[in-house]
Image (cartoon, helix red, strand yellow):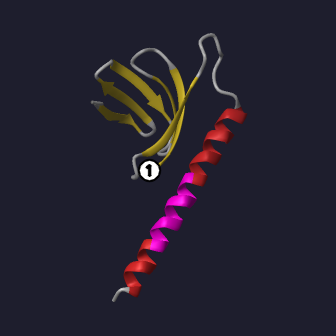
Amino acid sequence: MRFQKSIRIAPGFRINLSKSGVGVSVGPKGLKVGVDAKGRRYSSVGIPGTGISQRNYSKPGEEGHTPEEYHRALGAGVLIGIAIAIVVVIVIIAMASQH
């Protein structure tokens, strides 16, 4: 079982509580960088409000994520968003045609 609670400290800055401890993250909705409760650095991209996201961790000894890694993660998020939008449109059309 997983537990996570996020507390907004200031716009774009969060304290994240989990079973493992306390972490921090910064960034706008859908795009974050942070350090988790285990001290691992990560970048995350997601679709706000859906619970769908992808998290990429830095390897030990790395300075951080490169711009290319952020662009790959953002591209994956965009593709996921497009796929969800297509599914929603199909469901709406199917529901409308039943009436």
Q: Magenta part mainly helix, strand or loop?
A: helix
Q: Position of residue 68 (x, y in %)?
A: 72, 35
Foreground of the two, 93 or 21: 93
Q: What residue do we see at 48% from left, 72% from top?
A: 89
**For the N terminus, which image quadrant?**
top left
Which residue carries the number 1 mark?
Answer: 48
Q: Residue furthest bottom?
A: 99
In the rendered structure, the answer to whether residue 21 lies left or right of residue 45 reads left
For label 1, the SS is loop
In the rendered structure, the answer to whether residue 68 lies left or right of residue 35 reads right
> What's the magenta region?
80-90
In the rendered structure, the answer to whether residue 49 lies left or right of residue 30 reads left
Picture mark count: 1
Q: Position of residue 18 (x, y in %)?
A: 31, 25
Q: Position of residue 37 (x, y in %)?
A: 39, 18
Above or below — where is 99 with respect to 51? below
Magenta highlight on residue 49: no
Foreground of the two, 84 or 67: 84
